[in-house]
Amino acid sequence: MKKAARAIFETYLKAQILGTPLEHYEEVLYEAVVAHINIHLESVSNQHIPHGISRILGSPDLPDKFDWPFCQGEPLRFIAQFNLEEVAPYDTFEKLPPTGMLSFFHYELGELHNDLDAWRVCLHPLEALVRRSSPHRLNQNEKSFRTSFETVYEFIYNELIIQSGEEEFLRLARHSGGGKSTHLLGIASDISSCDRDGILLEIDMEDLGYPIDRYFGTAVFGIDSSDLQEQRFDKVWTEVTRD
């Protein structure tokens, strides 16, 4: 499916640049594109979410002996889990591991913390996961969101391409870009995050509402490309932006 998705994208790109100054920079454009995996959310009650699927908020599926992360004596909030076998067909450039459960925790999503204990990203095998409630029943009455995925493509600005056909490049970027949304990979929607190597997960707080409806903007979990390749999820950084 990944090869099919890539072939569809290449056909689309050829059609878009045919007869424009960008036609001579086809290979450069291939190097300047990143896959942005949009996450579409469906609100459901926590008890109605099947075991082991991708979702945001609620109660996570974790190894039985997993030590729940804490910060300043308080448990981190479970933010999201992604079954990477569900995500894999949309990860056209194979940036993520092909299997496992990728789980995200944060002390208080929407607030920037310098304490490295304020967030945690963990990769677990899919086998023998159990539904866990957080300490202090932090996630007990929370909304949960089932997820579905869609691959769109974003172009990284390249000075050579822009000099050759700025208008055509901007038109192409507008039609292909992911824009502001909750997504895996891709490019951060806020310019302040774009000097980082890569986005692992960006959450648009407006997509979630309760229990963090007092926050507006986005929360980014980022990781350098080399750390992602080596699955060093302890190297994840976070950034919060405000609308």
Image (tube, grey):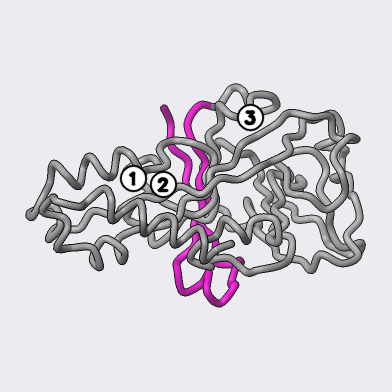
Q: From the image, state whether disc 2 or disc 1 is nearer to you.
A: 2
Secondary structure beneath label 1: helix
Residue type at the position of mark 3 = Leu
Please tell me how crowded label 1 is: few (under 14), some (14-19), or many (20+) other residues with Cα within 10 Å: few
Task: Label 2: state its secondary structure.
Answer: loop
The residue pinned by badge 2 equals: 188
How far apart marks 3 and 1 lie (CA) works out to 22 Å
Residue 223 is covered by the magenta coloring: yes
Q: Are marks 2 and 1 in contact (CB under 8 Å)?
A: yes
Specify the quadrant of the image occupied by residue 90: bottom right
Give whichever of 183, 230 is nearer the camera. Answer: 183
Residue found at x 73% / y 38%: 146
Q: Residue 199 in the image: state x and y as whole percent.
A: 47, 55
Residue carrying label 3? 208
Q: CA distance from mark 2 to mark 3?
A: 18 Å
Q: Residues within 10 Å of mark 3 (few under 14, many from 20)?
A: some
Q: Is residue 109 above or below residue 229?
A: above
In the image, what residue occupies the spot 65% across and 68% down? Answer: 98
CA neighbours of label 2 inside 10 A, class few (<14), some (14 to 19), many (20+) = many
Q: Residue at x 56, y 77 (%)?
A: 230
Q: Is residue 80 left or right of residue 46?
A: left
* Secondary structure at numbered mark 3: helix
From the image, which quarter does the N terminus lie in? bottom right
Residues in magenta, as a range: 216-243
Residue 192 is tagged as 1
Is residue 71 a member of the stretch shown in magenta?
no
**Which label's residue is closer to the chain start, 2 or 3?**
2
Earlier-in-chain disc, 3 versus 1: 1
Residue type at mark 1: give it: Ser
Query: Which mark identifies residue 23?
Result: none
Q: Quadrant of the C terminus?
A: top left
